[in-house]
Image (cartoon, helix red, strand yellow):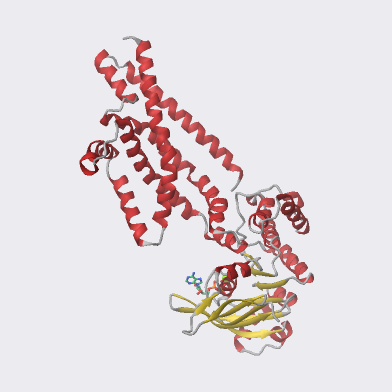
Amino acid sequence: MNYTVLLSQMLQATLMSLRIFFSTLLFSVPLGLLVAAGRRSKVKAVNLPVRFYILLMRGTPLMLQLLFIFYGLKPLTGIQLDRVAAAQVAFLLNYAAYFAEIFRGGIDAVPAGQYEAARVLGFTKRQTFFRIVLPQVCKMILPPMSNEFINLVKDTSLAQVIGVTELLRVTSDWVSSAVSMAPFAIAAVFYLLMNAVVTRCFTVAEARMNYYR
Amino acid sequence: MPLLTARNLYKSFDGTGVLKGISLDVDKGEVLTVIGPSGSGKSTLLRCMTQLEAVDRGEISVCGETLVKTGENQSAVYSDRAACRRIALHIGLVFQNFNLFPHFSVLRNIAEAPMHVLGKKKAEAEASAMELLKKMELSDKADFYPCQLSGGQQQRVSIARALAMNPDLLFFDEPTSALDPELTGEILKVIRDLAAEHMTMVVVTHEMAFARDVADQVVFMADGVIVEQGTPEQVFANTQSERTKAFLSRFNES
Ligand SMILES: Nc1ncnc2c1ncn2[C@@H]1O[C@H](COP(=O)(O)OP(=O)(O)OP(=O)(O)O)[C@@H](O)[C@H]1O
Ligand SMILES: [Mg+2]
């Protein structure tokens, strides 16, 4: 087994995992905010479809969603995404649903008195949300968000079911061809390192938000 | 002309009447205290006058501008958004549990609305915030966060926050009820000082001696109606109704 080749291929694959990780975060956080807003809407025509979307995303396996978007979209809509794009879309839709529920919980946890104080002072709804509510929500949702971020690092390995050459796919190919367990151990270290960084970022963020309450 | 006029206010929650025809006037520079048993609708009255709740029927006008009037089919008709907003800017409200913004420093709690609602410059807003803090004897706490302050200090910050908007009329909903008895005095003193400066105020309170001493006009509410109304002497010394007498007797004993 040539370790130089192994490591370089595994690093290459890690970059693919990271690409899915970051693209998911970049799009599913804002989409999650929108979905949370829709979920909180009192208008049934908005609220009901959003609830159905959240149920669908959280109630079916992410692996099935990946397979559906890669193989199932074409017959239905004629759109064929390439493997990586299909993975990115599936992850983004799935994680937005989870994030939305976390955001919703955070927004609902801001006491009514905060809205009332802002209102009496004359802040507009928009100002109230961005200046008063959102900063408090950010602090509250850090712990559940760190869980989701860590899950996402590991979930990127699911993209292999539609043939994306991410870290775990390359690893298991090496294990079967070289008949060695070493690649598994190396992959475990890679995932651990990525999640150590994620954990560290959240620890720092929590410490920085710790100046109040 | 009174600064605040309320006529025949009605408000119910889920069919239960909470305000059943409340009328009152507050003149400029006057202090009105509202007393009454728990559940009599005092907070609801304040919330209706500060636009946190909408009345079902009745008239409210502030500084000569109509907020709401009763329409043809006996339901409330509110003025347009711009008018409601103008009226809201004449009015400040101090809450029982302060409702300070926990993520802002004391200074920012006070300066935020003048900056972003009134469009004041940062330096100007902060300078007046510092002035208000000085008045509240909290100059050294400008950079603290609300969670680092005592209840009494938090309430003084929230009064400063309301004053920073230069309201013509300031409402207090039981400003001392969330405080330890030894901290109550410092808040009552602040309100007394404001009264001495002829700030127009409506104060809901369970502190009877304070309600009597600070007021130009006292209102006793029970079950959503005003049972007795008048000068402190009229209400406290020359009580007319049995309901008021019964309520005040508990206070006179203690
Ligand atoms: N948002 C609401 N929904 C339903 N009922 C309400 C609501 N707000 C107040 N009430 C009811 O209205 C009545 C009057 O409440 P309010 O808070 O105005 O009384 P209060 O005089 O301020 O009492 P306290 O001295 O305890 O503060 C109570 O019976 C209360 O349960
Ligand atoms: Mg009350």
A51 sits left or right of A114 in the view:
left
B176 sits left or right of A76 in the view:
right
Q: Nearer the viewer, residue B162 or B248?
A: B162
Q: Nearer the viewer, residue A167 or A70?
A: A70
Against B74, residue A150 (above or below) is above
Dividing the image into four quarters, tell me where ligand 2 lies: bottom right
Against A118, residue A172 (above or below) is above
Q: Residue furthest top?
A: A2
Q: In the image, residue A39 lies at what x, y percent?
A: 39, 55
Q: Nearer the viewer, residue B213 or B251?
A: B213
Question: Which residue is drawn at the image coordinates 63% and 50% (left, top)?
Answer: B104
Q: Residue furthest bottom?
A: B240
Q: In the image, residue A190 lies at what x, y percent?
A: 40, 23
Quadrant of the rendered image containing residue B48: bottom right
Question: Which residue is drawn at the image coordinates 42% and 51% (left, top)?
Answer: A36
Q: Residue furthest front?
A: A78
Q: In the rendered image, is residue B221 in sight?
A: yes
Q: In the image, residue A10 lies at what x, y percent?
A: 36, 19
Which quadrant of the rendered structure holds the C terminus of chain B? bottom right
Against A143, residue B223 (above or below) is below
Question: Which residue is drawn at the image coordinates 31% and 9% (left, top)?
Answer: A1
Q: In the image, residue B78 lies at what x, y percent?
A: 54, 75
